[in-house]
Image (cartoon, rainbow, N blue to C red):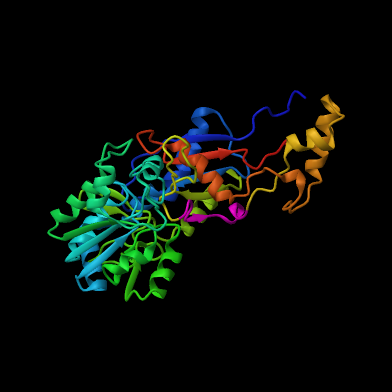
Amino acid sequence: MANERRVGTVSRGIRCPIIRQGDDLAQIVTDSVIEAAEAEGFEIRDRDVISVTESIVARSQGNYCTVDDIAEDVRNKFDGGTIGVIFPILSRNRFAICLRGIAKGARKIVLMLSYPSDEVGNELVSLDKIDEAGVNPYSDVLSLQKYRELFGYGKHEFTGVDYVEYYSDLIQETGCEVEIIFANHAKAILEYTDSVINCDIHTRARTKRILKEAGAKKVYGLDEIMTAPVNGSGCNERYGLLGSNKATENQVKLFPRECKQLVLDIQEIMKERTGKHVEVMVYGDGAFKDPKGKIWELADPVVSPAFTDGLIGTPNELKLKYLADNDFADLSGDALKEAISNSIRKKDADLVGKMASEGTTPRQLTDLIGSLCDLTSGSGDKGTPVVLVQGYFDNYTN
């Protein structure tokens, strides 16, 4: 009993130097993790997970593009006419610079905002106010004038920004004409233009299908803008502008390009230096919803764009309280502990549909661990862009 481990999963933020383009990220990450272990007195173990935030991966790749790069790509795809820009998220960091580039590449933007909130939960107007106004958000299309009559000006709870005004001003500052409407069904935009950029993230494939079936002539998702370099810029072949972040007022940092080799390199270097087989992943936004602000964090197209094979799949866990309350309700103390431990040791390789696993989290390992890492590293000044997760694959018997 003296040697029994008393700690399960531990998540540690690892401090690293500031990363610049061209840095050997695999070497920096492994150095930082090993130095942290030596400084803090903990050991690296098999199946520890080293998670690297997507931002330093993209920075080491130099994966940036400018407003002018975006504008040129948009002009090449749409010939500079009237473009419907639909379902964008409300974000100065995530979308504003992209919108500036799109506007510079168009003559007129018809901006269609979903309401009462965007895809990730940023609220334009409350559901209570929608109810009071007698508006049906599933069917009603509102002009800007009607929207202002019903709801006036409203500033975002956390940013203090009226996004309708902010996006309108931003478009006009580029010399582009703007019209704003509010609707939640994609086909509404076709009353205004048959050329569309749909900016939704997780519903983008369905939106494109609906628009094309309804007769739209040109449809590109935000994931199809900047999929190749423009004038030597960065790009993202798979996700385009999705997952990008503001770098400066005229530049965005794109989501990392292919980085499977990076996670494999880190795994290999750690094996050489410590003798331990660790798992490695790159992570972006976590996937969780804030009950107060109603914001669903995941503005990236995926939580993890690259990970080692040991992170494929979902947890396969038994619910301890189910076993304690049902199968072993008559046991207590050491007898209960031993019975539950035996159940865990003998559990099926696939517990899908089994009552004893009911209530466990049926999510991808990378989504769960990535969310833990995002919460650990934060999005501000913690200075820990690498997170070491230990004991994640332990269970009650370890």
Q: Residue at x 37, y 55 (%)?
A: 255
Q: Which residue corresponds to the image point at 25% horizontal and 65% vertical from the top-left?
A: 232
The front one of 43 and 335 is 335
264 in relation to 297, above or below: below
Q: Position of residue 362 (x, y in %)?
A: 63, 49
Is 46 positioned to the left or the right of 232 in the image? right
Q: Nearer the viewer, residue 189 or 42?
A: 189
Give x and y (percent) for residue 344. Answer: 78, 42
Q: Is residue 46 visible?
A: yes
Q: Is residue 111 left or right of residue 295?
A: left
**Residue under the point 43% across and 44% down:** 297
Verify whether residue 252 appears in magenta: no
Name the image quarter holding residue 238: bottom left
Check the picture and name the quadrant holding the C terminus.
Answer: top right
Residue 386 point in image, percent of width and height: 45, 41
Tell me: residue 141, above or below residue 362.
below
152 up-or-down from 186: above or below: above
Q: Residue at x 31, y 69 (%)?
A: 190
Quarter of the picture containing the N terminus is top right
Q: Which residues are magenta?
A: 302-313
Instruction: Give x and y (percent) for residue 192.
Output: 26, 67
Left-right relation of 69 to 200 = left
The stretch drawn in magenta includes residue 307: yes
- Which of 343 and 104 lies nearest the eye of the viewer? 104
